[in-house]
Image (spheres, rainbow, N blue to C red):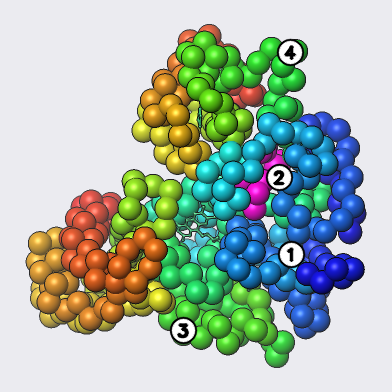
Amino acid sequence: MAPGVERSFTAASTLEEALAARRQGAAVLAGGTWMMRDPRRGGQLPVAVVALHRIPALSKVEINADHVVIGAAVTHAVLVRVLHGVAGFEGLVAAAQGAANPGIRSVATVGGNLCALDFAAADLAPAFLVCEATVELQTFEGPKLLGISDFLEGRHRLLTEAIVTRIHLRRDLIASAHIRLPLRKAGDYPVAIVSLAVDKDKRCRIAVGSVEPVARRWTALEQAMAAGPASALDPERAAELALEHNDFQGRDGKEAEGWYRRQVLSPLVRRGVAALLKTEGLA
Amino acid sequence: MTVTFQLNGEDCRFHGDPMTPLVDILRQERFLTGTKAVCREGFCGACTVHVDDEAMPSCLKPVGLVQGCAVTTIEGLSSGNQALHPLQAAFEADDAVQCGMCFPGMVMSLSAFVRDNPHASRAEIKAAMVGNICRCTGYERIVDAVAVCLDQARKAGQLVEGINV
Ligand SMILES: Cc1cc2nc3c(=O)[nH]c(=O)nc-3n(C[C@H](O)[C@H](O)[C@H](O)COP(=O)(O)OP(=O)(O)OC[C@H]3O[C@@H](n4cnc5c(N)ncnc54)[C@H](O)[C@@H]3O)c2cc1C
Ligand code: FES
Ligand code: FES
């Protein structure tokens, strides 16, 4: 920051106040676990920030009979606590519980995880993809709802004039699982992530994170699995199909090269299907 | 900007950049050097403190976010003249500490953990430590000491920081 310039810091207590600060150019500050490392990535901290932690509506999780609404400022730790044991969300809970470390999970928010631009290894992204989540944004023109895939694809552009407020999930899953491959047992970013879910029509949804720059559904594998009988969810068969339908272009990165990220997908699918079969919904 | 918060039970007022990492204020302004700034990226845990009773890294905490909060550092857990926290006593009794660099963070993370998880298994203790890197000990003695601390508290039916174990 230029010498003599005082940083502006707004702790908004309403969404309107936060949006007004955004209009004046303030960047959103959630837990800060991504933003505070900007200087170490060669960037600078924003001259103006607006913090969301004092907006009560953004820190709530609502569990209804047919849907769940997660505030963008809900932390990973709270998400785990609140959704633990809720049938169908095993994968989302595992994603929030396996990310980072306990200290970070107490602070890092759902919104921050999805809005950290250029972060390919976000655990919540593939987990929300298989939930077919809807992302609610508050834009300068008003509220907007977007499918999670469109949000992830377009977030660079979308977030210039918006705040993510809530994530909406239908309760149409009977089981889900989240399998991640870090280099060490824990504590570092996953090399590859496979999230899987089975919906009430017994259709399998699969998403992959950390392999390409942006997480996405693995539709080729979903279609191949749908062609077989729904009762025949089998880890070995799924792994074979994953090998056959691997259409990913692995990204090269510090932790692993692209070919490796791509290569590990088939075994991760095997583990994922095995984990699905152990859930209450399918056991 | 002025930020006010409780630091180890006393009022603390900071005037300056609200995006200053909390660890820098603790060390450079308050001379509470038990909190270490090692990686500054959330990976090593050496800077862990409690904010409103939750353990978190102070290197990634902009001070603006602690307005009105209660911050506890290792110095606030026990002054050294008082009785040690049961976990500190267990580390001392088990001779678990080597160079000591990681220990303030280790104690701050694990004291919150034992308070909230009085029946933790060995695997759960290990999972609670993934954000605290120790370059000396190989971890096993630390895990042993935490297990002993929990065990003793259970046997004595005591409280570990307010939670009846
Ligand atoms: C040591 C360490 C290990 C980690 N390991 C993992 C891991 O294994 N898996 C994983 O998924 N993640 C991991 N992470 C990343 C972590 O999940 C993110 O740093 C965190 O989720 C970001 O959330 P935050 O609330 O701290 O966001 P902030 O740092 O406050 O914000 C991040 C970005 O999102 C924007 N933003 C935040 N909220 C909103 C909103 N509501 N609307 C619009 N924009 C918003 C901010 O402007 C900023 O650009 C790790 C991080 C650390 C420090
Ligand atoms: S210095 Fe904060 S986690 Fe390493
Ligand atoms: S005792 Fe030396 S780093 Fe842990």
The amino acid on which the numbered mark 1 sits, given as a three-letter code, is Ala
- At label 4, counting other C-alpha atoms closer than 10 Å, the crowd grade (few under 14, some 14-19, many 20 or more) is few
Q: Position of residue A232 (x, y in %)?
A: 11, 66
Q: CA distance from mark 1 to mark 4?
A: 38 Å
Q: Residue at x 42, y 53 (%)?
A: A188
Question: Measured along the vertical axis of the image, is residue B123 above or below residue A234?
Answer: above
Which chain contains the residue that carries disc 2?
Answer: B
Q: Which mark is residue A153?
A: 3
Foreground: A247 or A109? A247
Q: Badge 1 local density, few (<14 within 10 Å), some, or many (20+)? A: many
Instruction: Check if mark 1 and mark 2 are on a common chain.
Output: no
Is ligand 2 within 8 Å of the beta carbon of the residue shown at mark 2?
yes
Q: Is residue A149 above or below residue B14?
A: below
Q: Chain of mark 3?
A: A
* Magenta-colored span: B49-60
Give the residue at mark 1.
A51
Q: Is residue B8 above or below residue A278?
A: above
Which residue is tagged 4?
B82
Q: Chain of mark 1?
A: A
Q: Name which residue type carries label 3.
A: Glu
Name the residue carrying label 2. Answer: B23
